[in-house]
Amino acid sequence: MAILEMTQRGAVCHLTMNAPERLNALSDEMLAALHGTLDTLAQDASVRVITLAGAGKAFCAGHDLRQMTAMRQSEDGGAAAFKDLFDRCAAVMARVQSMPQPVIAQVHGIATAAGCQLVATCDMAVAAQDTRFGVNGVNIGLFCSTPMVALSRNIPRKQAFEMLTTGEFIPAARALDLGLINRVVAADALAEETARLADTVAAKLGAAVKIGKQAFYNQIAMTTADAYAYTGEVMVQNMLRSDTREGIDAFLEKRDPDWDQ
């Protein structure tokens, strides 16, 4: 049984974290599977959107605490192993956002600690109504400092700090209000709604979405003036593409574009 299952429907690739007995924790094996699979999919031109879900009762419960406890047996008390773990987790999060394809989280049950970080890292997220989100490490004496990076870049800082210091869960409706997720639906409609969103994005010109995703994350770190200068150049290059020219001509001529996706 694969720890990360993959199916493809048209231009959409669906990944499922498949360790339900561990609530799909980001174990060494799960991190390796995610990073390796994403690296492969980044080179697959047939895939224009990726969706990510969890098997069983939860989306993802964060790091594997049993593995982390075992790391303490080393002479340095686990310092090197812990640093390596958090670096590998950060590399997976960075890989999600550097993918040419949008990545959509399909969230149910709970998304806690690094699992909440994963939701915040994905480009979009759809959640079932009964999903709960939390960065709960503080409850066991471990402040969620690395999940904080993604969380604080998604929601208002005071709300992020409250979640981080209280360790309390927020419901899906609140996560939607704060901007952590895009849509909330009934649990039995979760897969369908995620697929609908994925199909909508996959129907666009893949090259344009790839250009746009890269520019989106690049400009966020810039000043407003630098961001306008940079994105202006991006739009120039986008406009010069023959497939973009075809899209504009098709719009003006009131016909569907003849794109070779």
Image (cartoon, rainbow, N blue to C red):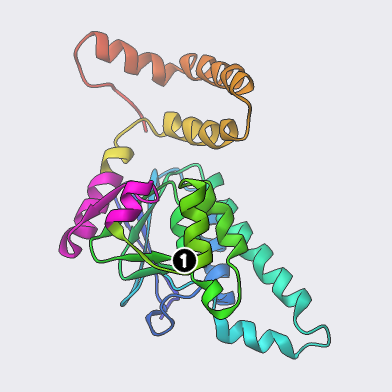
Residue segment shown in magenta: 173-198
Viewer-side residue, 100 vs 141: 141
Above or below 141: residue 244: above
Q: Is residue 194 magenta?
A: yes
Q: Residue at x 22, y 21 (%)?
A: 256
Viewer-side residue, 126 vs 203: 126
Residue 149 in picture, x, y percent from top left: 58, 53
Q: Quadrant of the N terminus?
A: bottom left
Write down the quadrant of residue 17 in the picture.
bottom left
Amino acid type, mark 1: Gly
Above or below 24: residue 45: above
Tell me if residue 226 can be seen. yes
Viewer-side residue, 215 vs 157: 157
- Mark 1 Cα shell of 10 Å, populated few (<14), some (14-19), many (≥20): many
Residue 130 in picture, x, y percent from top left: 24, 66
Residue 233 as seen in the image, left or right of residue 6: right
Residue 218 as seen in the image, left or right of residue 16: right
Helix, strand or loop for disc 1: helix
Residue 194 in picture, x, y percent from top left: 27, 52
Residue 212 as seen in the image, left or right of residue 8: right
Q: Which residue is mark 1?
A: 115
Write down the quadrant of residue 5 in the picture.
bottom left
Q: Residue at x 59, y 75 (%)?
A: 28
Considering the whole magenta stretch, tell me its main secondary structure: helix
Residue 126 in picture, x, y percent from top left: 30, 53
Q: Quadrant of the C terminus?
A: top left
Q: Residue at x 66, y 71 (%)?
A: 85
Above or below 64: residue 160: above
Q: How many marks?
A: 1
Q: Is residue 151 magenta?
A: no
